[in-house]
Amino acid sequence: METEIINYIVSHKDKHYRIAYSYVKNQEDALDIVQDTIVKALKYQHTLREPHYLDTWFIKILINTCKTFLKKQNRYMDIDDETLLSLDAPQLDTYKYFELEDALDQLSYNEKTIILLRYFQQFELQEVSTVMEQNLSTVKSTLYRALKKLKLLLENE
């Protein structure tokens, strides 16, 4: 199993780096996160029951490592939907140009992760559901809500 994991890591290193970088926006931090993820994956390889879920299993570890890093840096806030809805709508500058990356950064951690996995990593919705440990219908509704938010953010360029 260790050989399979190592081969997977080597063949997908660019993908893993891109995912980590999309969260932390810093080359050194992204590389550190990928390295920490590799160590965790090798240490906990016995928890992978089905080898065909290697990609999903590794990405889940990677995302959780990003989340832990951001919490330690005080750059992550987990806000439930009720709290988010109770906040005043953000005031957007009409002259600011929103690129996709900027718009993604304005989504909640959960929304951003689902969009990244679905559209940037081409995960099926069921795989996203597994990685996020959420019900499939929850993932779908979060995805559509996030897409609506992105559309509004990108239209307000």
Image (tube, rainbow, N blue to C red):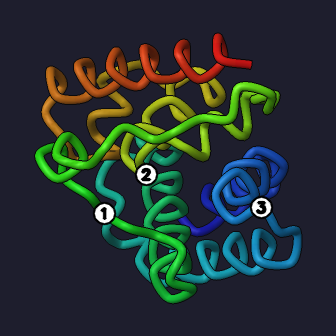
Q: Are discs 1 and 2 less than 8 Å apart at CB?
A: yes
Q: Secondary structure at mark 3?
A: loop
User: Up-down: is 45 above or below 123?
Assistant: below
* Left or right of residue 120, residue 59 in this image: left
Residue 93 in the image: x percent, y percent? 68, 35
Question: Residue at position x 45%, y 22% from top?
Answer: 149
Residue at 62% x, 30% y: name it.
121
The span from disc 3 to disc 1 (Cα, nearest Å) is: 19 Å
Q: Which element type, helix, strand or loop, lies under badge 1?
A: loop
Label of residue 47 in the image: none
Position of the C terminus, as image quadrant, is top right
Amino acid type assigned to the residue bearing label 2 in the image: Tyr
Q: Is residue 41 left or right of residue 46?
A: right
**Residue type beneath disc 3:** Lys
Crowding around mark 2 (Cα neighbors within 10 Å: few <14, some 14 to 19, many 20+) is: some
Q: Which residue is mark 1?
A: 78
Three-letter residue code for mark 1? Asp
Q: Circle 2 sits on which residue?
A: 109
Compare residues 100 and 32 and report the one nearer the observer: 100
Q: Which residue is mark 3?
A: 25
Residue 133 vertical placement versus 98 (above, below): below
